[in-house]
Image (cartoon, rainbow, N blue to C red):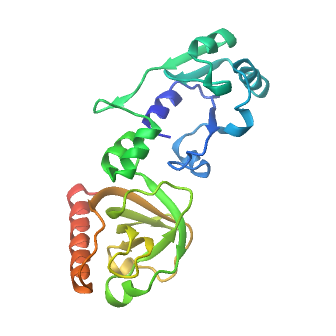
Amino acid sequence: MHLAHQKLFSHLCKDGAIVVIQTEYENLSPKKDRDEYTKYPIYLYPLNDIKHLSGKMFIELLKKEFPKLQKIIVGFDFHFGYKASCDIITLKDLFNGDVIVVDEYKIDNIAIHSRVIRSLLVDGNIETANKMLGYYYKIKGNHISGQGLGAKSFVPTINIETKRYLIPKDGVYVTKTIIDDIEYHSISFIGHRETTDGRFAIETHILNSSDNLNIIKNPVTIKFYTKLRDNKKFNNFESLKKAIYIDIDNAKNYFNRYKK
C-alpha cells in the first residue's frame, strides 16, 4: 500500500473499492493491516484461486461480483489472466466501461514498486523505503521472553516475535514502539546477539526509562525511522554496553533534532 498505489486510489469515486490479488508477497502490509492505509473497502482474491482464469473469465468474474462496475483503474504495467497473458489493450477490449491507466510514479527518479521497497528494507535503507511507502515502515508481533540480560546488565528491552512481516536488515534502528495505541520513543535491535547467546532477536528499548512497561499488551508494533548501525560482535560485555549507550544517545538526538 505504497505511494504508487495511492495514486491509483486517488482516481476512485466515493463508491470505489480496491481489488487485491493476494500473493505470497504480503509482507510489507499483511492483509489484516491494509485497512489503515485507505478509506476504501478492500476485496482479496487469492492468486491460487484465480490464476487459472483466462483474461475474459477474470473480467466476467469482476462484472458478476461487482454488478455496478463502471470503471477500472490500473497501473501502466498491469497484466492479468492465465500466466499474465493479458495487458491493458486486452482489458480495454474485454471491459465495456472506462479504463483509467495511471503512469509510473517515481520519487528521486526511482520508480516505486513493492519489489523495490522490499529490496531497500533488506538493505537497511529505511528512510528511502519510508519515502516510497508514504508512511513509516512497521512490523507487529507478540511479546516474548528474552534472555534476561537487558534488565540485569544493560538496558531493559521488549522482545517480540513476528512471522508475517519482512524484517529489515540486521542492525540498530531509531524507532517508535507502540503498545496499546500509545507511541514511545525507542531504539530497536534486529539480528543475532553475537556477543551474548548468538540467537536471533527483535528487541526494542523505550528511551524514557520511566516508560519501560512491566505489563506488555499484545500486539507490539515497532515503527522504523532510520538505521544507526549494523549488527556487530563486541569483544566483551563492557564494549557492548558502551555501544548501547551511544546508540541510545544517538536515538535521543535524532528525535530532538527532527521533533518526531
- Position of 168 with respect to 33 (left or right) is left
Which image quadrant for residue 21?
top right
**Percent x, y of residue 195:** 32, 79
Q: How many marks?
A: 0
- Position of 122 with respect to 26 (left or right) is left
**Percent x, y of residue 33:** 57, 51
Q: Is residue 243 placed above or below 77 in the rendered structure?
A: below
Nearest the viewer among 141 and 40 is: 141
Q: Is residue 175 visible?
A: yes
Q: Is residue 224 placed above or below 44 in the rendered structure?
A: below
- Name, please, the residue furthest toward the bottom: 152
**Percent x, y of residue 59:** 71, 21
Q: Quadrant of the C terminus?
A: bottom left
Q: Is residue 150 placed above or below 59 in the rendered structure?
A: below
Q: Residue at x 61, y 48 (%)?
A: 31
**Percent x, y of residue 222:** 44, 62
Which image quadrant for residue 223?
bottom left
Q: Residue at x 33, y 53 (%)?
A: 124
Which image quadrant for residue 99?
top right
Q: Residue at x 45, y 39 (%)?
A: 115
Q: Is residue 46 visible?
A: no
Q: Residue at x 68, y 25 (%)?
A: 82
- Position of 146 with respect to 226 (left or right) is right
Q: Is residue 47 placed above or below 244 in the rendered structure?
A: above
